[in-house]
Image (spheres, rainbow, N blue to C red):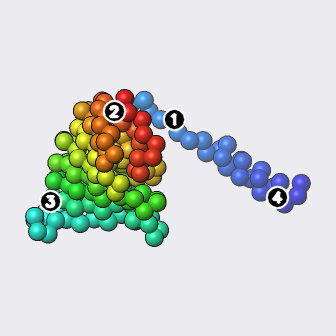
Amino acid sequence: MNRTSACVFVVLAFIGCNPKPERSPMAVSPSPTASATGGVPPLHFVGKGTADRPIHIVQTRGSRTLYEIFARSLEGTQVAGAATSRLHNARIIFHDGHGGRLIAVAPTAIVDQLKDEIELEGHVHTVSSTGLVLDCDTLIVNRGTDHLRGEGHVVMTDPKGLHATGNRVDSNLSFTKVRLQ
C-alpha cells in the first residue's frame, strides 16, 4: 500500500468511527437573519433632507451611473450587506446604457439591493429624454437589466402625438421596446 492510499484509509477510518449525531426532531434552527449575518443584528438607518437640500444617492457600476436619487427622507435596513430602503417624495434619474435618461417622480420609492430593483409607488410620473411621458400607479425598474414594468392606470404620451392607455406596460429604459396591455 502506498503512502497516499494509507492516508486516505486513515481519514476514512476516522470518519467511520466518528459519525455525525442524528438531529433531534425538536431541534430549532437559528433564525435566517442570525445565520445570514453571522450573528450580527440588522442595521437600521434613517435619513432626512429638506426641500432645498434633499438626500442625494448615486449608484454606479464601473464608470457608468445607473441612477441618481433625490428624496426628502429615507429609512431602511441592511442585512448581510444588502439593504432595502424606503424613500419619500422621491425623484429618480435612471441612466440607460446609451446616454438616455428617464426621470421618475413618486411619493414613495423602495430600493431593494437583493432583488436589484427600484419600485416607485403612488401616482408615478416619468419623462424620458426623448419627451415620452409615462404615468402609472406603480413602476418597477430592474437595475441589472434596465427593464421597467408599469402597472395600474397606465397612460403614455409622446411629442409626436401618441396617446395610449392600458393597465400594464413593459419596456426598456429607452422605450425602444415597449409592450402595452
Please give the count of numbered marks on the rendered protein. 4
Q: Are marks 3 and 4 in contact (CB under 8 Å)?
A: no
The residue under the point 42% across, 57% down is 96
Q: Residue furthest right?
A: 1
Mark 1 → mark 4, Cα distance in angstroms? 31 Å
Instruction: Please name the residue that numbered disc 1 is placed on.
Output: 22
Mark pair 3, 2: CA separation: 28 Å
Nearer the observer, 34 or 18? 34
Mark 2 closeness class: few <14, some 14–19, many ≥20 residues within 10 Å: some
Q: Nearer the viewer, residue 60 or 97?
A: 97
Question: Dot 1: within a 10 Å radius of its alpha carbon, few (fewer than 14), some, or many (20 or more) residues?
Answer: few
Residue 72 in sight here:
yes
Quickly name the residue at label 2.
Answer: 168
**Residue bearing the label numbered 3:** 72
**N-term mark: 3 or 2:** 3
Residue position marked by numbered label 4 in the rendering: 4
Q: Are marks 4 and 2 in contact (CB under 8 Å)?
A: no
Identified by mark 1, the residue type is Glu
Kindly check if marks 1 and 4 are in contact, taking CB atoms under 8 A apart as contact.
no
Going from N to C along the chain, the mark reached first, 1 or 4, is 4
Q: Secondary structure at mark 1?
A: loop
Mark 3, Cα crowd under 10 Å, few <14 / some 14-19 / many 20+, is many
Q: CA distance from mark 1 to mark 3?
A: 54 Å
Residue 86: x, y in percent?
Answer: 22, 51
Which comes sooner in the sequence, label 1 or label 3? 1
Q: Secondary structure at mark 3?
A: loop
Task: Classify mark 2: helix, strand or loop.
Answer: strand
Q: Amino acid at mark 2?
A: Arg
Q: Which three-letter amino acid code belongs to the residue tagged 4? A: Thr
